[in-house]
Image (spheres, helix red, strand yellow):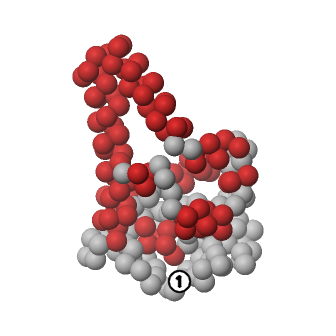
Amino acid sequence: MMWLIRKPAEFRERSKRYAADVSKIWYCRLFERAGIYVLPHIAVATTLYFTLGLAGMLWCLYVPMLVIYNVTWSVNSICHMPRLGYRSFDTSDHSRNNFWIGVFGFGEGYHNNHHAQPRCAAHGLRWWEFDLTRYVIWTLEKCGLAWKVVWPARETKTSTDPAPDRAIVVSSQAETLA
């Protein structure tokens, strides 16, 4: 479970490569510190315990955490299992799109789409692929809280992996990112 708090060196290198702009934002750098997770959790658990009792703490904090963690981890386990989903793109890995993980994971279950277009803000690329995260990011962009968001173009079709240093998705102006 420490992998949630302590990140390996290669993770940091990948973060610099794919999200260099995020590391420049001061409040995003706070999430690299372990205490940022532990202290608020203890404060919330204590408050819930003294206001709602043990049952309130369990149902308001730990049951939702259990559900959210399991859905999140299902993305990387179920969505890489053969025969448990469909593939929209011919990628070199075993990633799959899984409708039910997509619904419960707010769009994260369309994992093959993510592997084919890793920089794209939308994972649900078909009309029936429910992707709530896409609309949250769109709202943040419209409010000025997210910028340089990469959206899929309507004409984007691919059957192969992108080169690791190139994105195959195109911006809203239909310019290929290099």
Residue 7 in percent (x, y) is at 51, 57
Residue lying at 33% horizontally and 19% vertically, measured from the top left: 49
Crowd rating for badge 1 (residues with CA inside 10 Å; few <14, some 14–19, many 20+): some
Residue 42 in percent (x, y) is at 42, 28
Residue for badge 1: 161
- Decide which of 66, 90 is in the foreground and name it: 66
Which residue is at the far top? 51
Residue 76 in percent (x, y) is at 37, 64
Asked if residue 101 shows in the view, the reply is: no
Taking 133 as reference, is 46 left or right? left
Q: Secondary structure at mark 1?
A: loop
- Decide which of 177, 49 is in the foreground and name it: 49
Residue lying at 29% horizontally and 36% vertically, measured from the top left: 63
Residue 174 in percent (x, y) is at 72, 73
Taking 109 as reference, is 162 left or right? right
Please state which amino acid type lies under the numbered disc 1: Asp
Residue lying at 49% horizontally and 72% vertically, measured from the top left: 115
Residue 53: image quadrant is top left
- Decide which of 111, 153 is in the foreground and name it: 111
Reply above or below: 26 against 20: above
- Decide which of 168, 156 is in the foreground and name it: 168
Reply above or below: 156 against 130: below
Residue 43: image quadrant is top left
Reply above or below: 26 against 103: above
Q: Which quadrant: the C terminus?
A: bottom right
Residue lying at 51% horizontally and 43% vertically, measured from the top left: 34
Asked if residue 63 shows in the view, the reply is: yes
> Total number of numbered labels?
1
